[in-house]
Amino acid sequence: MVHKGMMTVAALLLSTAAFGQATTPAPSPAAAIVADASAPKGRLPDAAVPKAYRLDFTILPEAERFSGHGEIDVTLKRATTRLYLHGRDLSVSKVVARVGGAVVPATFTQVDATGTARLDFARAVPAGAATLVFDYTGRFGNDAAGLYHVKVADRWYSWTQFESIDARAAFPSFDETGFKQPFTITVTTHPGMTVVSNSPETGVTKVAGGMEKHGFAPTKPLPTYLVAIDTGPFVRQAGTIAPTPERSWAMPYGGVATVPQGDKLAYVMAETPRIVGLLERYFGEAFPFPKLDQIGSPIMPGAMENAGADTYGDGIIFLDRNATTSDKKEFGMVVSHELAHQWFGDLVSPEWWSDLWLNESFANWMGYRIANEWRPELGIGVGALAEGFAAMNTDALEVGRPIHQPITENSQIDGAFDNITYGKGGQVVAMIAAYLGDDKFKEGVRLHLRRHAYGNATSEQFFQSIADAAHDPKVLASLTSFVDQQGVPVVDVRRAGGKLTATQARYAFIGSTPAPLTWTIPFCVRVDATKQCSLLDKKTTTLSAPAGRVVMPNVGGTGYYRFDLAPADWQALIAASATLPAGEAVATTDSLWASFRAGRAPASWLVAQARAMAGNSDPAASVDPGVRIAGLRARGLIAPSSLPAYRSLMASIYTPQLTKLGFDPSVGAYRSEDPRRQELRHRLVALVADEANDSATRATLKAAATRYLSGDANALDPGFLFSALTVLAQDGGLPVAKMLVERGLSSEDATLRSSALTAAGSSGRADVARYLLALDDPRMRSSDRLRLIFGVVGTVETRDLGTEWVLANYERLIAGANGVFITTRLPSAFASQCGADRAASIDAKVGPTIRAANVGLLAYQRTLETIRLCGALRDAKAGEIAAAVSSAGR
């Protein structure tokens, strides 16, 4: 699974139960759940092992409920009258155990909110083989969790999203990663519907009531979370992926879309085979399942690697000829990530959720790696490093967790889907791969897959495969030092007398005092063109220092560590910013800002580096310092009195860059241009229009947006759409915001819908914010509502108004919420606040609720610490920031 950017994810997290629209109400806990003090809170007891599932659903997507008949073949280790398994919010009308020719009735009781359930048998069921048989109904969800449905245009569709523990909301099950077994699935639905599941369809038969039953071949062994069942009037385009050296047969595959997206399948159909081929070449073996479907969903906030049936947000895979460089980069990375999971996660699955990090960390690294091979001209690979450095700000907090975290309770599982797993884990994998060399690391991965194909594996087994292939036991020490402990190392590098001294310590922000730690760090340093690498396994290590001007202590940017330098070496590195390779440029910016936030580097260096880095050829590296400076404004660290100087500073750095590139917002104006140059222009326009507040750029955007909204589809390139609509909303006030909401809710175009609604939420106007927070429209999906809310909260001018609204409505917002995309990230709504007083106020209002629910607690504690640390930075550096901005902005 991969999440979209944190702001986007945050905008898709809440339950629609808080709002006056058609929703899936939460069951009454008193009626549906009977507490059982003996029930497991995490892993089930080992009393039963599932061997096979047969699931027969009736799915009418427009209905409120679906029905199912499920049969689970199990092996009972001992005779029993009681058995724990999973089922959440299901109405079970009948359950029996079949043992040979005998039938033993049972009752089904849900015993906790996470979906643990208990079967009580009328008499003891003997040890050995048995079949558990269930008849039940369940309620469709409206969010991307469980079996959910969405009305698109005038027709209903349903999808499934079962990771992490939401399969239990669709059928009674042993809903754990460690159980892998085949599934045989049938679905009865309206005639003419398309049904997609994990395995090839075996046929469609007419049944009673004019309905049709779709049958599917038994799957390969799968855990419950990888099962997929999608039903509706989909458009499905079929194709085949030609044989490769690793696969002797032509593999069937398809693109699956709702009707409004049905004309946008060409890109995913054309590009999927190339990515599959690259992955087969890397893993050295064929795609592990008999077919592949690439499926779109309008409310999926990311993507999911269901075996043979990957699901994506519509905007990720349904691209047209005007798609931006950023769109294509996201497509390549996310599709490569999800398809990499078909081997690493689906073929070999984690033994338990404690090993989830290995699934996602490896797929994150592989997604960027394969995508970079797929389209090297797009510069996709540097995104992995940027994600890793962003994770360091979370990892450096005192409140946190290691990548490899013991998970003992169901309530902890969704918290593992964070940027420590994806960003830190991905960069640790990249660091070890770079240290070992591609061939050795690849052989370790292949060995791991061969050893555990169609089974499960632990982190320790993966480590052993890598070490066995590399013939280097030290790699285990390095891996475990990063995987099994929290925190970010900072390596202080000093030159003297032909020697280079590297001293490691645990990084700490101003206002933070984390406990000291040490790591075994794969450290690579470059002095001008001369590179050397070493494992830093002591606090201080001395290396030879070749003569040279520029010291780069993180060659390629692949190391998961920050660095610090003597002032003269910092100045030389800053001066070289424009010439640094993309990865090293991103690493330099991160480490410089880390030095500033630790109380060492002065604010004036940040401005100097922004000016120097603006000339870097990589689009992300070029604007990264400016985006970080803009973040100071968003957090309130640039006072209103300094705002004119701030605008002048941003204009002096980025407006000349945009002028040099040229700016025509119309569709196709730069189609033949280098894609990175196109991307740079899109990034620059956002900074120049919003942060520099450049009147000419804003006027150009407004004029283009007006023509676009009046029907001129060629007036506005998609890469400028959000910036243009935001300028329109900022200047147009409430009438424009209402118009944008109407345009967004009336459209099934993923880019227009999300851009229009988020732009309305980002107007910065209090009257607009109040209107949006009170808005009630039956066309609004949960994701739409939340784009508006997080637009308000994420805009500095309406931040406090929106935050107070979330605080006042917090309990309603989390009522009935389930799924990995939901409550564990809701606390990010408060993250733009600053100061210990604000943290205390927030905690007083919602802390007791969050602690009592014990869901999203770690994310909440991190948010509180972030708010406090912002206050510490403000107290220590506000004057210095103001002076640097004022001096540079003249």
Image (cartoon, rainbow, N blue to C red):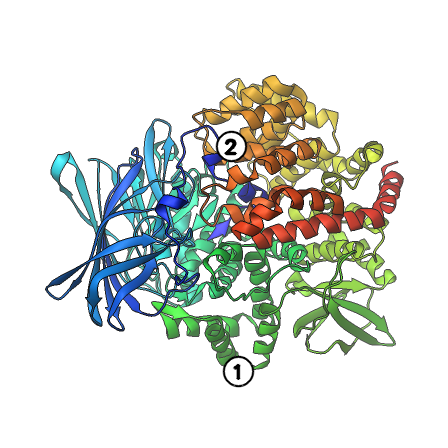
The structure residue drawn at horizontal position 39% and vertical position 34%, both measured from the top left corner, is 261
Is label 1 in contact with label 2 (beta carbons under 8 Å)? no
Q: Is residue 585 above or below residue 141?
A: below
SS category of the residue bearing label 2: helix
On screen, residue 86 versus residue 72, left or right, reads right
Q: Which residue is mark 1?
A: 471
Of callouts 1 and 2, the N-terminal one = 1
In this view of the protein, can residue 667 be seen by the observer? no
Vertical arrangement, residue 360 with respect to residue 5, above or below: below
Q: Position of residue 307 (x, y in %)?
A: 35, 56
- Vertical relation: 524 (above or below) 589: below
**Of residues 505 and 263, which is closer to you in this image?**
505
Crowding at label 2, few (<14), some or many (≥20) Cα neighbours within 10 Å? many
Instruction: Give the SS element for disc 1.
Output: loop
- Amino acid residing under circle 2: Arg
Q: Is residue 252 left or right of residue 825?
A: left
Q: Residue at x 85, y 64 (%)?
A: 566
The amino acid beneath tag 1 is His
| Marks 1 and 2, how far apart at CA | 54 Å
Badge 2 is on which residue?
785
